[in-house]
Each structure stands twice: as C-alpha cells, then as structure tokens.
Amino acid sequence: MGYWIKMKVKNSKHERTIDMLVDRLIKSRKYDLVEKDIKYSYRGLEGQIDVMAYLRNGFKRQRFYFFEVKSTYNKKSLKRAQKQFDRYKRVHYKQYVEGYIVTMKKNRKIKLKVINGN
C-alpha cells in the first residue's frame, strides 16, 4: 500500500508566483512592508497567508493587502481563496484589509482579482 505526502515543492508554480509577486510589490515601493508565508492562530482559527503587504497611511488607519496565490483561476480556487480571506477577517476584524486572488498567466503576467474588502 502506497502513501501520498503533500508537500510544497520549492520550485512549484505556486512558489514562483509568490516570489514574483513579492518582488513586484517591493519594487513598486507602494508598501511599507511585504511578507510571505505568514501563519496565524487565534481562538481556534488558524490560517496561512501567501503574501501580505502593509501600508501606513499617515494618521489614517493602517491598510493590509491580503494576496492568496492559486495555481489556476477557477470557481474552486476562488471559493478557497474567499474562505481563507474570510477566516483572516474574522480574526483581524478591526483591520482594514483588501483581499486579492493571484494567478500567473502563461506569459508570466500576474493576474489579480479582488476577493473582498472593507
């Protein structure tokens, strides 16, 4: 009897897309901080964020940009990204957060689609 083990492959399309997105967000100089692979846990809700960007807007409230990377864009991946975003929002309900699902097209262009925001 064989067993399948799920693990992240270092050079997978998912990882390459995350690295490309982080690189582009940093080079844009629009954000104060860009991080990847963030894990959180609060009152039984656990999750992981592929990429989070942070923007401090002077005296205005802080803004967080949630990026969930998926290998393909379809209804199933959109539903999973929405679920992940909603879980994060339940834990961080006081934050201003915009959510995006990110996929890489064949021409290596990144496609962003808004999940939801405040």
Image (cartoon, grey):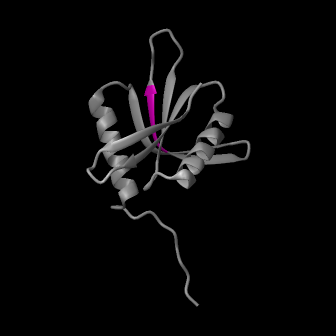
Determine the residue located farthest toward the front in the rendered image: 75
Q: Nearer the viewer, residue 20 or 79?
A: 79
Q: Is residue 87 left or right of residue 107?
A: right
Using the image, determine if residue 90 lies above or below residue 2.
above
Q: For the point 59% across and 43% down, which residue is it?
A: 82
**Quarter of the figure that contains the C terminus:** top right
Which secondary structure dominates the residues rendered in magenta? strand
- Number of marks in the rendered image: 0
- Residue at point 31%, 45% (across, down): 20
Q: Is residue 31 above or below residue 112?
A: above
Q: Is residue 72 above or below residue 67?
A: below
Residue 85 at x, y percent in the picture: 59, 40
User: Residue 33, how many percent across, how many down?
Assistant: 40, 30
Residue drawn at (66%, 29%), measured in percent from left and top? 93
Residue 4 horizontal side relative to residue 106, left or right: right
Q: Relative to the observer, which residue lies in front, 52 or 70?
A: 70
Decide: is 98 above or below 72.
above
Spot occupied by residue 57 in the image (x, y as percentages of width and height) = 45, 15
**In this view, which residue lies farthest toward the right?**
43
Measured as percent of width and height from the top left, residue 71 is found at 43, 56
Image: magenta residue range: 50-54
Q: Residue furthest top?
A: 59
Q: Magenta segment: does it hold 91? A: no
Task: Name the residue located 56 percent from the left edge and 28 percent from the top edge.
Answer: 117
Quarter the N terminus occupies: bottom right
- Residue 52 is covered by the magenta coloring: yes
